[in-house]
Amino acid sequence: MHYRRLRVRLETERHTIEGTLQLPNEGYRSRMTDFLNSHDSDFLPITDAELTWPGGTRGTEIHSYLAVSVRHIVLGVELESLGTFDETGEPPSATHFVVSSPPPA
């Protein structure tokens, strides 16, 4: 199975989180909105995360992993696509197509 990695910004009432979200490459839940709606009582795994507080009350924290409660997210923005990867974390190998020719007449 292939996955898409997106750099996202998620805001709760108390935090702003920028990090990487991994989504299925195609099919159901491949869009961020569908993914969030299908996990309404779960936590989202966010990697390479920067956690900030509104008003600058505390400094930015850097975390390799955060679990964010979906029910507390009030805003979600896709910042950029980081590409498609397979289960091992490697980019998928190129698909080779063979051009067929009609049979001889």
Image (tube, helix red, strand yellow):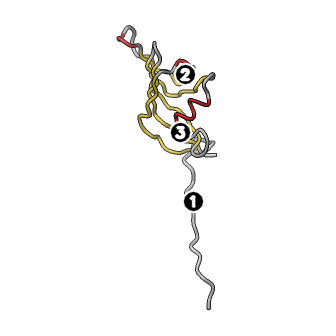
Looking at the image, which residue is at 51% across and 21% down?
73
Looking at the image, which residue is at 45% across and 21% down?
11
Looking at the image, which residue is at 45% across and 40% down?
81
Tell me the CA gap for discs 1 and 3: 23 Å
Residue type at mark 2?
Leu
Residue type at mark 3?
Arg
Quarter holding the C terminus? bottom right
Q: Nearer the viewer, mark 2 or mark 3?
A: 3
Q: What residue did someone put label 3 on? A: 31
Element type at marker 1? loop
Residue toward you, 99 or 39: 39
Element type at marker 2? strand
Q: Are marks 1 and 3 in contact (CB under 8 Å)?
A: no
Q: What residue did someone put label 1 on? A: 95
* Dot placed on the residue nearer the N-terminal end, 2 or 3: 3
Looking at the image, which residue is at 44% across and 27% down?
9
The percent coordinates of residue 55 (x first, y second) are 35, 11
Q: Going by the picture, which residue comes out furthest to the bottom?
A: 105
* Dot placed on the residue nearer the N-terminal end, 1 or 3: 3
Element type at marker 3? loop
Picture quarter containing residue 66?
top right
Tell me the CA gap for discs 1 and 2: 34 Å
The percent coordinates of residue 48 (x first, y second) are 49, 28
Q: What residue did someone put label 2 on? A: 66
Q: Residues within 10 Å of mark 1 (few under 14, many from 20)?
A: few
Q: Residues within 10 Å of mark 2 (few under 14, many from 20)?
A: some
19 shown above or below 86: above
Q: Going by the picture, which residue comes out furthest to the top?
A: 57
Tell me the CA gap for discs 2 and 3: 20 Å
Q: Are marks 1 and 2 in contact (CB under 8 Å)?
A: no
Find residue 45 and name its label: none
Residue type at mark 1?
Thr
